[in-house]
Image (cartoon, rainbow, N blue to C red):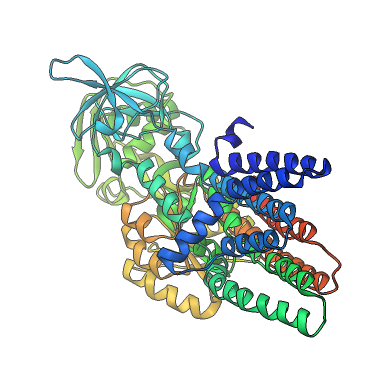
Amino acid sequence: MKKWLQNKGFRNTVICAVLIVIGIVLQYQSLENVAIPVFIAAFLIGGYYSAKNGIEELIHDKHLNVDVLMILAAVGASIIGYWMEGALLIFIFSLAEAMESMANEKSRNAISELMNLTPDEARRYNENGEIEVVPTAELKVGDKVQVPRGETIPIDGKLLSTDAVVNEASVTGESVPVEKLTGDEVIGGTINEGNRIDMEVTVEDSNTLFAKIIRLVDEAQSSPSKTASFIESIEDTYVKVVLVGVPLFIALAYFVLDWGWTESFYRGMVLLTVASPCALVASATPATLSAISNAARNGMVFKGGQTIDNTNALNAIIFDKTGTLTVGEPAVTDVYYVDGVDHAHVDEVIKSAESGSKHPIAVAILDYLEDTPLIELGHVEDITGKGFLIQNKGSEWKVGKHSYVLDESNIQLSEEVKRVVIEKESTGNTVIFVSRDNELQAFYALEDVVKENAKIAIEKLNNMGIQTIMVTGDNENTGKHIAKQVGIKEVHANKMPDEKSSILDELKEKYGNIGMVGDGVNDAPALAKSSVGFAMGSGTDIAMETADVVLIKDDLTMIPYSIGLSKKMKRIVIANVLFAIAVIALLIIANLFQAINLPLGVIGHEGSTILVILNGLRLLAYRD
């Protein structure tokens, strides 16, 4: 309750309610002359913000909104002596507006939650090498910062310490801490779980990853959906129609239906109240904000309400392969040893030879042989573009590609080995051969492995009836191999970067609304041309800027999640609009038959507004 009372609109509403209760008690005690000023005070306090907003919008924007209708209805009721009814109308309308304001604030909390991930202060080294605590916003590129164990890294930068263990769950969603080495990137908002580290700031505070995310969410929440935009655009016209229609109704009731002046005017005020589009105006915006906030909380940024509208209409989605469906780095997936070879010794030689290299293939092999001990080798020569030549204990070892290890030494493969090698190479594997004194010892097959969540994401999309497509620059065998692993139905291989955009045009003609998922500069044109572009959060800045949706945590399962969230939002908005129109129509008809009074009309009308707001807020709790 304390948090609610901090909201000025809600606080005035509470005071208004208390004054109305006092006024009713005074009326019951036959103290009408004392009750009227109390009702007027309730009227002024409860209606202050509504009147202020309505007048400001009318003067500055030349736009009539529902606030004007409510104030006029309350004033009209008071003119004919219905003081309590006028004050009650203001109270319930004020309550509905306060609830909508707090609902929108609750939906916008995703921004403050993101901002809280990065600390307000940082430990910066000064010119004397001493630590000084400064606001994070004051950090400049080149500043050196200390991050104690267990604390949050305040800003993006590069590691100066020899190593670090960082929990990047807030960015990637991966709970397993990541090991970092000198020069590696560290991201603000992630947690140092190892020893105390030093880092160098590489960006201004306004250009960090989290700053970009916050800007994207903020802009998205300021961009309404198509439905919300349409409703807002007709509000001014709708209010004008009501303002013209109410006097006509009063005249019709007085001159044609012979209801009497007081009854005719009273019914006109009821009509002014129940015909107001409050519930209709609130049908879409709270739902849209809730959907955007839900997505942000789960590591996905929609760039506006219109993007959510477009997402539920997707019929097909195109996936880039490298870095999107796959990790983007090679990993050893298979090792073949020739019969009679000492497996352990081969592994020891290879690990020891590769240990000094930073080449991605070397890194992958070293990861695979993590538990293999290092041994001292004789002479190791790194032959650029080919591999390693090793002289050790009288033997000559070669490690590298087919042409270097096999062809140059004229080593012939057995039919069985040849079959396996061809199979591996035809599906996109990189095969690294090992020979000793011109005899094949083993080979390592490396592949850009599929992301763990890719298969789950594709399966969900297929189950939703959405066509899944891969467009890749790799050969067809490699493309089909990856597609088979994840369940993608259609593959377009051997496509150059500039061809991705043209193939998207062809697929648009075939499927209609189509999404595109990518992470690189070469994906940007296709992301821009698609109905909805999804950019991986680990991708390039241009891909993130061009796309409509950014997957901050690189989790492909958020794509089917986004479609489900979008469809849910559409159903809720449609239900809200139909419900709001039905309530307005029902209350107008009831007023024509004199079946409702002003308080009941207010409760029915504003009650429907509160219900559509609460219905929209359900999206905050949406789960796949």
Horizontal and vertical percent for residue 486?
A: 56, 55
- Quarter holding residue 499: bottom left
Residue 266 seen in this snapshot: yes
Residue at 75 percent across and 82 percent down: it is 252
Horizontal and vertical percent for residue 559?
A: 55, 55
Q: Is residue 371 left or right of residue 23?
A: left
Numbered circles on residues, count? 0
Q: Is residue 477 above or below residue 215?
A: below
Q: Is residue 290 left or right of residue 501?
A: right
Q: Is residue 544 above or below residue 363?
A: below
Q: Quadrant of the N terminus?
A: top right
Horizontal and vertical percent for residue 403?
A: 28, 52
Residue 298 seen in this snapshot: no
Residue lying at the far bottom of the rendered structure: 256
Q: Is residue 604 left or right of residue 400?
A: right
16 or 560: which is nearer to us?
A: 16
Residue at 24 percent across and 49 percent down: it is 408
Residue at 61 percent across and 52 percent down: it is 97
202 or 39: which is nearer to us?
A: 39
Residue lying at the far left of the rendered structure: 127
239 or 444: which is nearer to us?
A: 239
Horizontal and vertical percent for residue 9?
A: 57, 44
Q: Is residue 86 above or below residue 105?
A: below
